[in-house]
């Protein structure tokens, strides 16, 4: 069965604890959410059909060991679970970035989940699937993209309410152009939070709207 793929490219991983590493990105097409700060709106509909073998072949051409399956929302694709396992089977390190609204329970345990917890500022916080928290491994990562101080306070409450600091890695990311990194750093230090400040590194290396990086 073919998958709808928006783009496949090699770049520098810009987010998560893997930031700074060379990475191949497999961006699937289609998303069930419409976040206010979305920087990949072109992935809503821009696609080409590719089989698993075609995707794996293109990924391997780059000679990079780290692969991120992203979107859009990759877990909407019927056979992405199989693709993830096959990439792992050939020895690649696989990251799966998901918006948190889709069940992650079937994702291969060898993969690293990077789940984007939608805050009120995204206008998509209602889509959060709380049950996913219980399915996270200690090696997985939760990312909160913050549009203002109210988002920060909301995210902090979620972290405490569900004991997330003891469950996996927590990333607090300032929405690019909306929250100054220095302000977020100050809030984290003031509250002595055990979270990692996470910048979108690629937007500081390249123009913020540049694709394929």
Image (tube, rainbow, N blue to C red):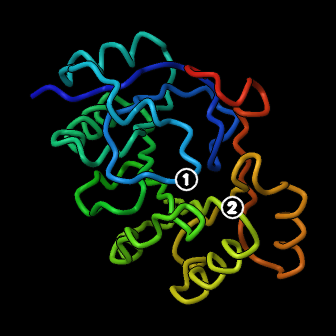
Q: Which sits in the foreground, 31 or 80?
A: 31
Compute the Cα span from label 2 to label 1: 9 Å
Is residue 112 shown above or below 53? below
Q: Residues within 10 Å of mark 2 (few under 14, many from 20)?
A: many
Q: Are marks 2 and 1 in contact (CB under 8 Å)?
A: yes
Residue highlighted by disc 2: 147
Is residue 18 shown above or below 163? above
Q: Residue at x 84, y 55 (%)?
A: 181
> In the image, is 207 to the left or to the right of 56?
right
Residue 129, x across and y down, in percent: 35, 71
Given the current orientation, which residue lies at the most extreme top position? 61
Q: Residue at x 57, y 22 (%)?
A: 211
The kind of secondary structure element at disc 2 is: loop
Residue highlighted by disc 1: 36
Give the mark count.
2
> In the image, is 212 to the left or to the right of 25?
right
Q: Residue at x 84, y 73 (%)?
A: 187
Q: Which of disc 1 and disc 2 is earlier in sequence?
A: 1
């Amino acid at each position: 069965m073919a998958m709808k793929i928006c783009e496949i490219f090699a770049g520098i991983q810009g987010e998560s604890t893997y930031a700074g590493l060379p990475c191949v990105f497999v961006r699937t097409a289609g998303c069930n959410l419409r976040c206010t700060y979305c920087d990949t709106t072109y992935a809503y509909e821009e696609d080409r059909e590719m089989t698993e073998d075609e995707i794996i072949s293109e990924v391997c051409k780059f000679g990079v060991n780290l692969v991120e399956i992203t979107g859009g929302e990759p877990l909407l694709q019927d056979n992405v679970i199989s693709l993830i396992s096959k990439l792992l089977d050939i020895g690649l390190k696989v990251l799966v970035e998901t918006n948190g609204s889709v069940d992650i329970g079937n994702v291969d345990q060898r993969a690293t989940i990077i789940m984007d917890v939608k805050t009120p500022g995204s206008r998509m916080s209602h889509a959060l699937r709380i049950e996913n928290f219980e399915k996270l491994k200690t090696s997985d990562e939760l990312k909160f993209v913050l549009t203002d101080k109210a988002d920060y306070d909301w995210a902090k409450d979620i972290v405490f309410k569900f004991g997330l600091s003891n469950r996996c890695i927590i990333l607090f990311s300032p929405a690019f152009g909306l929250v100054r990194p220095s302000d977020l750093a100050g809030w984290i230090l003031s509250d002595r939070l055990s979270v990692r400040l996470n910048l979108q590194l690629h937007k500081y290396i390249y123009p913020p709207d540049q694709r394929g990086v």
